[in-house]
């Protein structure tokens, strides 16, 4: 169980990939994560940037995330950017439940494609997402952009659950 706040954590790379501003789970197990994530980032000068707050891959399992994601971001000047707040990657990588709001998270690339301003699921499974998505964005100066709030690809499974029809998607671009 991890309780707390992750504020202003950063990973930066000049020539390689930058992943997981706050938490990287690679093939491990995180049972319960009760935390807010604010202003965390992954920045790469020439490599891929992904998971401004959380990066889950390599058959990693996160059972529960409960908390808000605010102003987390990823940025690359030379390659792809994927998942401004959360990036879940690969067959076998699973996040069972995310309960929290996503506000003002973003993904940016100066030179390549961008996927998921708040959340990207790339071939993994996210069983349940419940929360509002407000003012998240994806931006590229030169290539295509996909999913201001959420992007799901690669045969991945992602379920957004609106209990009592109360999830709001607003101002995402």
Image: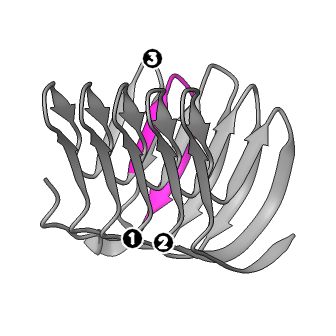
- Disc number at residue 125? none
Instruction: Determine the CA span between mark 3 and mark 1.
Output: 28 Å
Residue position marked by numbered label 1 in the rendering: 71
- Depth check, mark 3 against mark 2: the one in front is 2
Q: Quadrant of the N terminus?
A: bottom right
Q: Secondary structure beneath disc 2?
A: loop
**Residue 105 x, y percent position in the rendering:** 35, 62
Residue 61 picture quarter: top right
Q: Which residues are magenta?
A: 119-131
The residue drawn where x is 24% and y is 27% is 111
Above/below status of 85 relative to 75: below
Observer-nearest of 90 and 127: 90
| Residue 51: image location, x then y, percent | 53, 46
| Chief secondary structure of the magenta portion | strand
Q: Which mark is residue 39?
A: 2
Quadrant in the picture for residue 82: top left
How many numbered marks does the figure carry? 3
Q: Within 10 Å of the Cα at label 3, are there few (<14), some (14-19), or many (20+) other Cα atoms?
A: few
Marks 3, 1: nearer the viewer: 1
On the picture, is 165 further left or further right than 8? Answer: left
Given contact means CB atoms under 8 Å apart, are the residues at marks 2 and 1 in contact? yes
Residue at the bottom extreme, as displayed: 4
Q: CA distance from mark 2 to mark 1?
A: 5 Å
**Depicted 129 relative to depicted 45: above or below:** below
| Mark 3 lies on residue | 155
């Amino acid at each position: 169980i991890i309780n707390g706040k992750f504020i202003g954590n950063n990973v930066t790379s000049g020539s390689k990939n930058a992943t997981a501003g706050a938490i990287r789970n690679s093939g491990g197990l995180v049972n319960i994560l009760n935390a807010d994530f604010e202003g965390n980032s992954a920045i790469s000068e020439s490599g891929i940037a992904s998971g401004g707050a959380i990066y889950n891959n390599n058959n990693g399992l996160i059972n529960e995330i409960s908390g808000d994601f605010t102003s987390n971001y990823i940025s690359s000047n030379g390659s792809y950017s994927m998942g401004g707040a959360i990036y879940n990657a690969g067959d076998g990588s699973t996040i069972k439940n995310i309960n929290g709001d996503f506000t003002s998270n973003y993904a940016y690339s100066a030179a390549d494609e961008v996927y998921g301003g708040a959340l990207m699921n790339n071939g993994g499974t996210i069983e349940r997402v419940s929360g509002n998505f407000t003012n998240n964005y994806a931006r590229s100066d030169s290539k295509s952009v996909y999913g201001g709030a959420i992007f799901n690809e690669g045969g991945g499974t992602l379920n957004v659950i609106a209990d009592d029809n109360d999830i709001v998607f607003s101002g995402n671009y």
